[in-house]
Every structure is written in structure tokens, then in C-alpha cells.
Image (cartoon, helix red, strand yellow):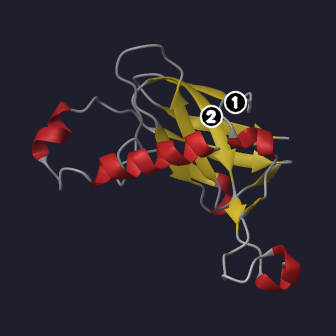
Amino acid sequence: MRQALLLILGFAFVAGCGGGSDEWTEKRPATAPAEGKLTYKGEGVEGATVLLVPDAAGGEVYGASAVTRSGGAFALAAWPPQTGVVPGKYKVAVSKKVMPEMSEVPADSHDSDNTAPPAKNMLPEQYGDPNKSGLTLEVPATGKTDILLELK
């Protein structure tokens, strides 16, 4: 999970670099639409993070991510806020983290320096690791707008 967090932070850093530089925008690889729906036990999942990790050896690789909207809908982005991903093969990780209400946390489970309790994953842990999720995705150059990620 730590790798996924570092990858997300790396995307955020890259997306924030360049201050809208036309040179970077012109030199980056072309993207294709990648949209779909995330379900868990048949229901759409809102507020989950979908992370694409390139499944390639060597060369330049670019991941993508999205946060699901109402009904589980998502549009992946390699360079937010523009949507689209670099065509290729990906491993997929999915998680939905929520902070527990303080009333739900036993008083003796956190220390006196006011540190917050850890976030709780509302989806099975295996899906949060792209190497264990069993989820893969291939996005062709023409894009893929009917992605269905079904979690059991």
C-alpha cells in the first residue's frame, strides 16, 4: 500500500510541476479516454481511489488514477485535471479509505499526543495492492469507455 501512496504522490507532484508549461504538455505522450464503473458486491462504490500501475518492463511508463463518483463512475487521468491515460497494459489497485468517527475509537487505542487513528479501508485489502488485486486493464490507443471493475 505504501508503494501505491508514493505513486499517487508522485502523480500529484508531476501534475503540479511546470505551471501549465506548453513545452511539457506538447512533449508528453498522447492519452486515450479510460472511463468506467467500480462495483463491490454488485453496488457502485463512490469515493474510492482507482490506481493504474503500468505493467511494462523498461522504457517510460505512466500511471493514472481516479476517484469514483456517484454510482461508482470514474474517468482515469494520467495528468489531472485532464482525463485520459497513456495506452497500454496496467495492473489495477482500488481502495476506499475513511477516517473512523472519534466516537467509534476506543479511548485507549490512541495516544495522548492527539494522533488520529488510522483510516479504515472499506474494501477488501487485497484490492489495494496492484500485485495482489487480480485486476488488470488494457487501454488501446482508441480508448476504453466501458471499463467495469467488479470487486467481490
Q: Amino acid at mark 2?
A: Val
Q: Are marks 2 and 1 in contact (CB under 8 Å)?
A: yes
Is disc 1 placed on a helix, strand or loop? loop
Sequence-first disc among 2 and 1? 2
Where does residue 86 sit, x and y in percent of width and height?
39, 29
> Residue 114's image quarter?
bottom right
Q: Quadrant of residue 24?
A: top left
Residue 28 vs residue 2, the one in the foreground: 2
Label 2 CA crowd tier, 10 Å (few <14, some 14–19, many 20+) = many
Type of amino acid at the residue the image marks with label 1 = Leu
Q: Residue at x 35, y 33 (%)?
A: 31
Residue 75 in view in this figure: no
Residue 151 on image: x %, y %? 79, 41
Side (left or right) of 95 relative to 13? right
Q: To which quarter of the image does residue 135 belong?
A: top right
The structure residue drawn at horizontal position 67% and vertical position 54%, both measured from the top left corner, is: 72
How many residues crowd mark 1 within 10 Å: few (<14), some (14–19), many (20+)? some
Above or below, 102 against 150 in this view is below
Q: Element under label 2?
A: strand
In the rendered image, the vertical position of residue 149 relative to residue 136, given as above or below: below
The residue depicted at 53 percent of the width and 32 percent of the height is 53
> Residue beneath label 1, please?
135
Q: Is any part of residue 20 visible from this angle?
A: yes
Quadrant in the picture for the N terminus: top right
In the rendered image, which residue does mark 2 sit on?
92
